[in-house]
Amino acid sequence: MLKRISALVLAGLTAMAVAACGSGGGGGVSGSDGGGSGGGDDAITMGFSQVGAESGWRTANTKSVQESAAKAGITLKFSDAQQKQENQIKAIRSFIQQRVDVIAFSPVVESGWDTVLKEAQNAKIPVILTDRAVDSKDTSLYKSFLGSDFIEEGKKAGQWLVEEYKDATDTVNIVELQGTTGSAPANDRKEGFAQVIAAEPKFKVIASQTGDFTRAKGKEVMEAFLKSNPDIDVLYAHNDDMGLGAIEAIEGAGKVPGEDIKIITVDAVKDGMQALADGKINYIVECSPLLGPQLMDLAKKVVKGEQVPARVVTEETTFTQEQAKEVLSTRQY
Ligand code: AHR
């Protein structure tokens, strides 16, 4: 009997050792929290560095990643960078030290990642970019980039404006609330919008400043815009939260959002959709935060060493006020 038990224990230990060697390309075993590989083929630990909690979009994205990891049986080591690149770099280095099986992160800004990504590559830990891109020339530093086409989002915002003002002959004065300086969505949403409106000289961006993707900063910057520019026709905000903050500023200045000043935003989170349905926002370009399920699928594949697409673009749509009223009750985030 004792002999049989010993044989079983030995077989179990051997299986665990084999599984640990085969996991993640990094041979990683857990940290003290019991995470990490070593339990078999599908025991995966993901280190995930999130940008922060700056917006409704971000909260929904965090929830999607956490719920999807739990559903996929992936142990998630989650780190909130509070909108600071240095915190993300620290988190990634800590994931490397803990020898997680895969690292995923949403880079707060586009530049300055090559060194730490090289460290992950040297440690043979695959990296997946999610939501935001990096501008590294060496694309072998990450396996895949899952997220929206932010240039396309900016273009959609511009196309709506061109159509809305197609009969206007006067100058259309636009103010722009940009996202976090240096971030991919701020750079690309600005660029896509500018490309489209450039075709018509009547469109003039009279002020453009960062509101850091937050409601509070959106309000503050819009208040300053309103003080120095009496004739604002349109606000283009790179996300709903800044647009919602700006609505408070516009109302505070005695103007009617959606009428005196037309508003275009990006994201389509519930609060934004409510303001759209209420007529305070005129148009929203969707940016889906529900990236969790696709991220976990990609993670499982890269850990197994399977080929994955270098770029996975999120499917998205746009909403008018009428469309917002129709879908509001079933909106997931
Ligand atoms: O990277 C996605 C952007 O980040 C969202 O549009 C914005 O709300 C968030 O903060």
Image (cartoon, rainbow, N blue to C red):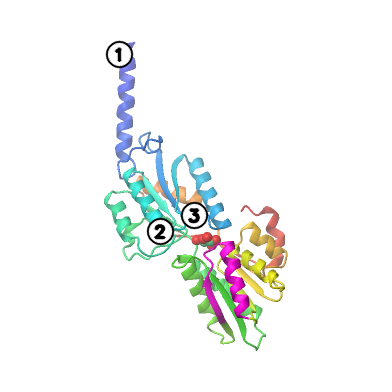
Q: Residue at the spot x=32%, y=60% of the render?
A: 114
Q: Work out how far the residue at label 3 is from the one at label 2, CA to CA, in angstroms.
A: 11 Å
**Can you give x and y, in whole percent of width and height, for residue 132 in the image?**
45, 61
Q: Secondary structure at mark 2?
A: helix
Instruction: Give the Cα separation between the discs numbered 3 and 1.
Output: 54 Å
Amino acid identity at mark 1:
Lys
- Cβ atoms at labels 2 and 1 below 8 Å apart: no
Under 8 Å from ligand 1: the CB of mark 1? no
Mark number displayed over residue 91: none
**Residue 94, image x and y in percent?**
35, 47
Residues at marks 3 and 2 touching, judged by CB atoms closer than 8 Å: no
Q: Is mark 3 within 8 Å of ligand 1?
A: yes
The residue that appears at 30% across and 41% down in the rendered structure is 27
Crowding near pointer 2: few (<14 within 10 Å), some, many (20+)? some
Q: Which residue is mark 3?
A: 52
Residues in magenta?
Answer: 205-229
Residue 11: image x %, image y %? 31, 24
Q: Earlier in the sequence, mark 3 or mark 1?
A: 1
Amino acid tagged 2? Gln
Residue 119 position (above or below residue 237): above
| 127 over 233 or under it: above or below | above
The residue lying toward the viewer, choosing from 140 and 232, is 232
Residue 207 on the magenta segment: yes
Q: Which residue is mark 2?
A: 85
Q: Earlier in the sequence, mark 3 or mark 2?
A: 3
Residue with the mark numbered 1 = 3
